[in-house]
Amino acid sequence: MAERSFKKEVELLKLGAGEVFEGEGILAVTKALLQSGVSYVGGYEGAPVSHLIDVLSDAQDYLGKLGVHVENCANEAGATAMLGASINYPVRGAVTFKSIVGTNVAADALSNLSSPGVVGGALIIIGEDYGEGSSIIQERTHAFAMKSQVWLMDPRPDMQNVVNMVETAFELSEASNTPVMLELRIRACHVTGKFVAKDNIAPAVSIQRPLQHPVFHKDRISLPPATVIQEKLKTEVRWPAAVKFIQSRRLNELFDGELADLGVILQGGMYNGAMQALRTAGLCDDDGHSMVPLYVLNVTYPMVPDEVLTFCRNKRHVLVIEEGQPAYLEQAIKAYLHDAVIAVQVHGKNVFPVAGEYVGAVLLKGITEFVALAQPDHPVARDIRRFSQYIETVKAQALDLIGKPVPPRFPTFCTGCPERPVFSAIRLLQEDIGEVHVSADIGCHSFATLEPFFVGNTILGYGLGLASSAGISPLMKKRVISIAGDGGFWHNGLTSGVANHMFNQGDGVLVILKNGYASATGHQHIPSTGVNFKGQPTGMDIESALRGVGVKWIKTVPSYSVGKMIGALKGAMNEAQHGLKVIIAEGECALAKQRRTKPIDAQRLKAGERVVRTRFGVDEDTCTGDHSCIRLSGCPSLTVKTNPDPLRTDPVTTIISSCIGCGNCGEVAHAAVLCPSFYQAQVIQNPGWVDRLLNYVRGSVIRFLQRQVAPTSVLGPESAEGVDAPASIPTPRKSAVGA
């Protein structure tokens, strides 16, 4: 079950010419693909464009009627390889995946796609996941565009402009016989806006109207001597054709301003943030008119030298707003101006941070510093300086009010996550056998490298946990434990990790966390889900795949059974026989399970049927305040509160209402032989007569036993003179049955 459904929204994809589309950015991109007559679409899930796969999945019935083929690819390399259909045939295709890690995976296919070039339009929609909100390494797609000679679009995040650029990207691709990448930042993906729709175009070549004959051209094969010819065509034919198309269609935008001797050149994706910063600084009015002239690059590669020179001519100072490093645009602009002998002072990384996301405060600071440097005597510059001083004063006042920095909040597992107890088990294992090197992997389970587990010494790539242990494993006294999610296992781990390990007769332990989905990106289906995104059974399972490449030592353990997991880990670590040992930790993603079961429970409650919910609690009288349960599980539902016993100062553990009853806290406590403080309760809604009878009997027994307790026992064998003993003891709130 995907993170969210687009079943209702996909009706917007059917809008015709002149109708107004209003919706989310990702949905608008899908509509633009259909308006472009795309024949096939594929991709691999990954933020911030993972929802594009969800939209395609939910719209498959309509896409099928248009004849559009949809493919959920095994990884980004497979998605890029799909575009090979456009090398020989005049068919338009598009794929999508996350950058930069996804582009890294796709690099081989990308090179072999760009070298021969394409006949049909080929578009790669890239989720540019750069900045502090990203969970990945900080790199940019721009380097791949330059390396492989693929054109890169970075559209100004206006809904109509984004749609236009998607459609134009196919035309640019066909005009220059080159694949095109269109990058979308997270805000562009999820912004809501409007645009005027066009009719969808049923592709001339489709699953309903297939090609009749194959086409072969030896010059389109990436082998010598064709590769030498292809390289010349890239630089001498395709590049000039792309520049001519960009210039003639005016894909980049010019906006005039009163301060004619200044100028700002910026990536299209930075436009909205830059305009807000200019407005805050008093350099832009409420209608979006900037006092400083702007040159907005909707296409950041290739650049158009003539446009750059025309914009910069007669200007004294130009600011380049380019997020991230290296400063490809700034360096290129300086080179163009140097060669043309145009004396313009170019600013960029001298007023902006070299690296990092350009959020509002960063843009405001950089733009104000630029104006102060360029025109220090201008009234606007003086106002900006006063404004900057005011901002710094407000910041200082805010720091004084806060008193101290807010504690950092590290990302962690969701409440009830089945992967949490696995890492509790590894922590407990290391307390018994000593420290172990753990090769971690990308996915939700990478949170185990942070508080409170600190389990994971390296992360080298999606599905590469076992592969990354190949170098260190033979050099360690103890066996190395490698981690893989089932998503990473199918993405890359089976071949690069398991098959390679078996081929080289390696030794080690692999823990595969099987939760049934690509959970970190929104619960897209994977082979171990059991069905594909079309609902068709796959007949694929992890254990069969492992045995298929020769793995013999395999154990499947329920994820929440901490004790059993510790036993399996000890068995794998102490096994005398050399070779790979695989433990499959099986437990459905808690979020996906709740999304699946909550609607069912709601319907049952509405129908008056019996529904049972499990909850856990902590006996305050028994809890010693050791808090090892919190340190070993880190569950967000576990916290502390003031000890009710006035003679004890240590706070006691308590479980808040976000508990979903997974039982991990009690399992950890039991496995670590910590304490008997945890108890389990069942909340029964719409109870039957049996439930009511049991509740009455249990309550009666409890009240009877309570009456047998001598009231004076609170004060000792003999009550103190003059003190009245309580008439009764209230029923404990940890009753086993709720009504």
Image (cartoon, helix red, strand yellow):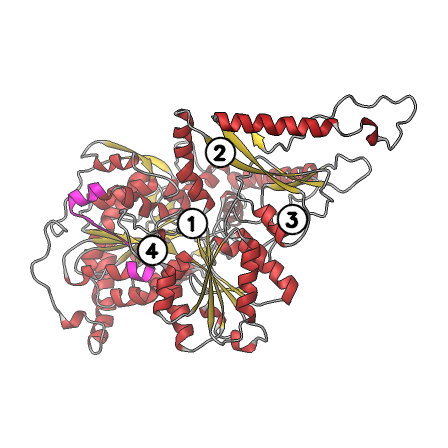
Q: Earlier in the sequence, mark 3 or mark 2?
A: 2
Instruction: State the separation of the CA atoms marked 1 and 3.
Output: 26 Å
Q: Earlier in the sequence, mark 4 or mark 2?
A: 4
The residue labelled by disc 1 is: 519
Q: Earlier in the sequence, mark 1 or mark 3?
A: 1
215 or 548: which is nearer to us? 548
Instruction: State the separation of the CA atoms marked 4 and 2.
Output: 32 Å
Horizontal side of residue 655 vs 244, given as left or right = right
Q: Disc 2 on helix, strand or loop?
A: strand
- Residue 283 is labelled as none
Q: Disc 3 on helix, strand or loop?
A: helix
Q: For the view shown, which residue lies furthest in the left direction? A: 212
Residue range in magenta is 61-79
**Placement of 663 over or under 495, stated as above or below:** above
- Residue 612 is labelled as 2
Could you classify mark 2 by the number of other residues whose Cα lies within 10 Å: few (under 14), some (14-19), or many (20 or more)?
some
Q: Position of residue 296 (x, y in %)?
A: 35, 48
